[in-house]
Image (cartoon, helix red, strand yellow):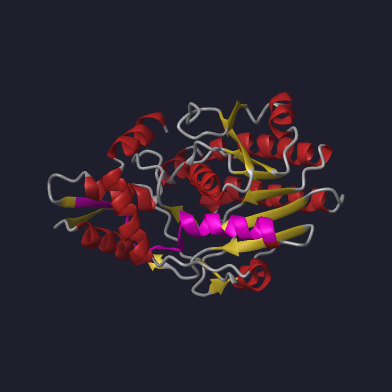
Amino acid sequence: MKTILICGATGFIGRNLLEYYIKQNKYNIRAIYHNKPALKEYDVEWIYADLKNADDVKKALKNVDVVLQFAATTSGANDIINRPYIHVTDNAIMNSLILRECYEQSIEHIIFPSCTVMYQPADFAQKETDWNAQDEIFPTYFGVGNTKVYIEKMCEFFSRLGKTKHTVMRHSNMYGPYDKYDLERSHVFGATITKVMTNTNGILNVWGTGEGGRDLLHVDDLVSFVDSAITKQDTPYELFNVGLGKAIKIIDLIKKIINHSGKDLKIEHDLSKPTIPTSLFLNCDKAKEKLNWEPKIGIDEGIIKTLTWYKENKSNVAQIKTVG
């Protein structure tokens, strides 16, 4: 049985991958923890590792076949605007070390989650080829966007050396179980869930106008993409868009969450808060063509699934908010 390594296994996407592959029972699983304690309720091999340290990276990757690199320094719009440097240095260092070690140890396959912030705002579904190096990345995302592009190119570079298969995902905005739900670090979906579910005064405060659009993908669909890439990619390097393929205005998303929550809330706009007024969504035809993957969970179903999980896991949500 092959061994799969989940970096960032205590985080949002990593934990969902962990639960999925435990149920599948088709790999030995090694899971990395760092800032959060190991989740001992999951019967897998836990390893403590600081992935910015070369020795820790070497230890973590020893005798592994597939690496799912979902460890990262991430946060929401507040940090992207006020502390953008935190997304640059750590992520560049850890991914440089991991990619080199994958090559050194002849790892079979690594999957790296990039992002979509390099794309220009647009009113059409953008393909992987719709961005080029001459495009100016939206100023708010300049640091994190260029860092992701650098790591994408590092994946392509190492893939040309012929030992390790590389999959890069430009995934859209994710949501679902184990997302960040604290208002300081959450993205728009998680923040709105928390605001709606904890509301006591009947008024929901919304940052900005809410006119920006987001392509929102439920984490279960991302997990299914990862599994498809592992089993079906037959080339040394591929870059895929991974999203729902349509945008929803933030204000419309908020209204849907309120409606599905069953609460009666009035929306008020706070124009002084940080907001990112861009809109983009993804063309994911390449993933359909090469991997036979497409998203299955629409936005309304995804909201209902997430609200149900939130209500059933209040203690987990509290832990996510405090330990994070």
Position of residue 38 measured from the top left corner of the image (x, y, whole percent): 50, 28
Position of residue 230 measured from the top left corner of the image (x, y, whole percent): 67, 55
**Badge count:** 0
Farthest right residue?
A: 161
Q: Quadrant of residue 263?
A: bottom left
Check the image and report above or below for 121 versus 313: below
Q: Quadrant of residue 66?
A: top right
In the image, is residue 9 part of the stretch drawn in magenta? no
Residue found 77% across the figure and 43% down from its top: 107
Residue found 23% across the figure and 47% down from its top: 197
Q: Which stretch is magenta?
A: 204-231
Position of residue 86 measured from the top left corner of the image (x, y, whole percent): 55, 35
Q: Nearer the viewer, residue 300 or 38?
A: 38
Look at the image and tell me in which quarter the N terminus lies.
top right
In the image, is residue 212 part of the stretch drawn in magenta? yes
Work out whether residue 56 can be spotted. Answer: yes
Q: Quadrant of residue 52?
A: top right
Q: Nearer the viewer, residue 167 or 120?
A: 167
Look at the image and tell me in which quarter the C terminus lies.
top left
Q: Nearer the viewer, residue 124 or 286?
A: 286
Position of residue 35 measured from the top left corner of the image (x, y, whole percent): 51, 27
Work out whether residue 136 can be spotted. Answer: no
Residue found 46% across the figure and 63% down from its top: 215
**Taking 321 as reference, is 10 left or right?**
right
**Taking 12 as reference, is 225 left or right?**
right
Check the image and report above or below for 114 versus 316: below
